[in-house]
Amino acid sequence: MQHQLDSKTHHSRQILLSLLFIVVLVLGLLYAKWVPYFQKSFVAASTHNIGNAIVGNGHLGKALPWFSLSLGWNFTKAYFLAIYKAFIVALLVGSLVQVLLPVRTIRKYMGGDKFSNSFWAMLMGVPTMMCTCCTAPVAVGLKRSKASTRSVVSFFLANPLLNPATLIFMGFVLGWNYTIFRLIMGIIVVLLVSWFISKVAKEKMVNVPDNKMFDPIEYDDKSLFTRWLEALGKLMLESIPAYVVIVFILGCFQGLIFPAVANLSNNPILGVIGLAILGTLFVIPTAGEIPIIQTLLALGLAPAFVGTLIIALPALSIVSLSLIKPAFSWKSVSYMFSAVVVMSIISGILGAIIL
């Protein structure tokens, strides 16, 4: 009898904690993503513009100094003003997922190495609408809560590539042919790259006993609040210092990373390869690729380069790779980068034919 009461109490507590997580997630997304993007969609529809490109300090497409501290400082300010709300939500969600959600719930949907796990994780990444850097703390939290490599990579890539707000903005600003192209290529990239990483990674799926509800923060005598503070503190220490430093360094080297459009057209093949590598390394906020591509299109950017940047810019960055590193090996991170570069090149080739 006592065992049944304890089991019922434990189950009720589990449901309450899961509901608390959902409430925090929904309120956070409403604050940082859903409401602002809903309002921004009307601006995009009426003006066919969502703002200036974050790179180049208003001089994108022109020759910039290969190194500039002022460009780095201006870029860092603009970037963090654009993402700070979402990053705060990401830290909260990434830490809470480790202490509020039962491991077997995560394992049920995201713990395996099957296509269905990857597909469910991809769908879960659509409504959260985060850029690759803001997704990283959540992905780390999921990995520490025993989600499989394939599911985590699928969720990680789906956020920036399949963001419905970005797709809508892209349709209003660049044209709906670009939206369709991005949607199809985005789905292909998410599913193929997550499958590939699951094959080269050491750990493909997880096995957690059904009675192990909270892991890896041990479910012991520590209070829920203490365990959450430990998870949050660990995420902050692993992410914020590197985040700020790398963003500033990238901002300083904008002139090296984004050469003049005229230089790209001299050798289209090297241009596509170069943009695939540099675009994958560079960091932008959510939908930041749209004003960049819009500006470069006005300067005569070739469709092949558009097809490359439409995947390379949002999918990953050196910042997000450094943020997700605590949950992955260097081998997995390097393979992830390489796979996205290759898919961006393929996207560029297809862009030259379709766009």
Image (cartoon, rainbow, N blue to C red):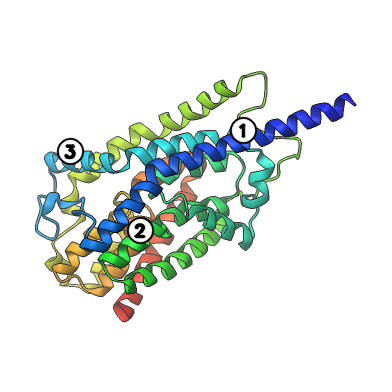
Residue 238 image position (x, y, % from top left): 42, 33
In the image, is residue 141 above or below residue 291? Answer: above
Q: Locate the C terminus by quadrant.
A: bottom left
**SS assignment at label 3:** helix
Circle 1 — which element?
loop
Q: Give me the disc on residue 166.
A: 2
The residue at which mark 3 appears reads as 73
| Picture residue at 61% right of the left edge, 20% below the top | 223
Callout 1, which amino acid? Pro
Q: Residue at x 57, y 24 (%)?
A: 227
CB atoms of marks 3 and 2 within 8 Å:
no
Asked if residue 299 is positioned above or below residue 220 in the image, the reply reads below
Label number found at residue 44: none
The foreground one among 227 and 20 is 20
Left or right, 4 with reference to 222: right
Q: Which mark is residue 216?
A: 1
